Amino acid sequence: MGFRPHSAPPGTTSHHNVVPLTPRPKPAKPRIVRISPENDGLELLYANDRHPDTLFSVRILCWALLDNDQVVAMVPWLNAVSSCADLADPLNGRWQGYRLPHSHYLFTEVPQHKADELRSAVKFFGSANAKQEVVQEIPDSIGTHAVFSTDGFQSINLQEVISWRLYGDGQLQAMVIEPGEVTNTPVLPGDPCLHAAQQHASFRYFFQHQVANRIKERDPDTLAAISVLARQRDQ
């Protein structure tokens, strides 16, 4: 039996029975317009379902001003760079606040000096127009490593992230060294030998240096956890 919509009165148009043939596009996520590196070691706190009574910390990479005027903390998280509100992992990791390093001082509001710095910088420098225009490039200060693998994590290639490059479309890309293209040392942000990790087909995850060091040491627990991530990624 076919569906037959009710008829509208003559001379009128009914919008209530209109069924769109294509889904409505989701609202665009706010775009990053400016970043400010976190140089004082502030940490982001999160919890997950496996350890509901425990808070874990991860160092903040930078603070970002979005095009809706919101300021958020950014961290390399699994296979992306995420704001505190967008944290998501297999154990339902979620943001809980911030911590001043080596102290018990916890807070949830963005530091005012960071918000002021970002908004002042946009007023001074303006906003980018071209999508592929490089707006900023900041050095990585938290020991981020990009993990590459082409065989389901049977073998792993770890590369240090040298810098983070913000483009006019709001994309924040991790820049790693292409070894065959190095002509100057040390390699500094902006060097032509740097390429975006996320653009490599074999890119898998980001890890900060503590985890990266355990991977280099072939720590069994760390490698087992990565195997779990690999299986969940392939599901």
Image (cartoon, rainbow, N blue to C red):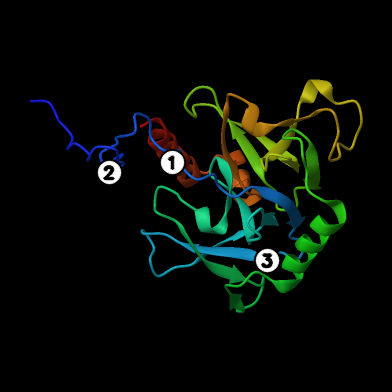
For residue 2, the mark is none
The image quadrant where one finds the N terminus is top left
Q: Residue at x 44, y 68 (%)?
A: 54
Q: Position of residue 120 (x, y in %)?
A: 82, 63
Badge 3: residue crowd in 10 Å (few <14, some 14–19, many ≥20): some
Q: Earlier in the sequence, mark 1 or mark 3?
A: 3
Residue 124 vs 185, above or below: the answer is below
Q: Position of residue 202 (x, y in %)?
A: 58, 25
The residue under label 2 is 16
- Of badges 2 and 3, nearer the viewer stands 2
- Residue in the foreground of this view, choosing between 43 and 196: 196
Residue type at numbered disc 3: Leu
For residue 224, the mark is 1
Residue type at numbered disc 2: His
Say what secondary structure mark 2 lies in: loop
Q: Residue at x 72, y 66 (%)?
A: 115
Residue 79 vs 77, above or below: the answer is above
- Of badges 2 and 1, nearer the viewer stands 2
Say what secondary structure mark 3 lies in: loop
Q: Residue at x 24, y 37 (%)?
A: 10
For residue 42, the mark is 3
The quadrant where residue 133 appears: top right
Using the numbered discs, state the Cα–Cα distance from disc 2 to disc 1 in whole angstroms: 53 Å
Is 47 situated left or right of 72 in this image? left
Using the numbered discs, state the Cα–Cα distance from disc 1 to disc 3 in whole angstroms: 29 Å
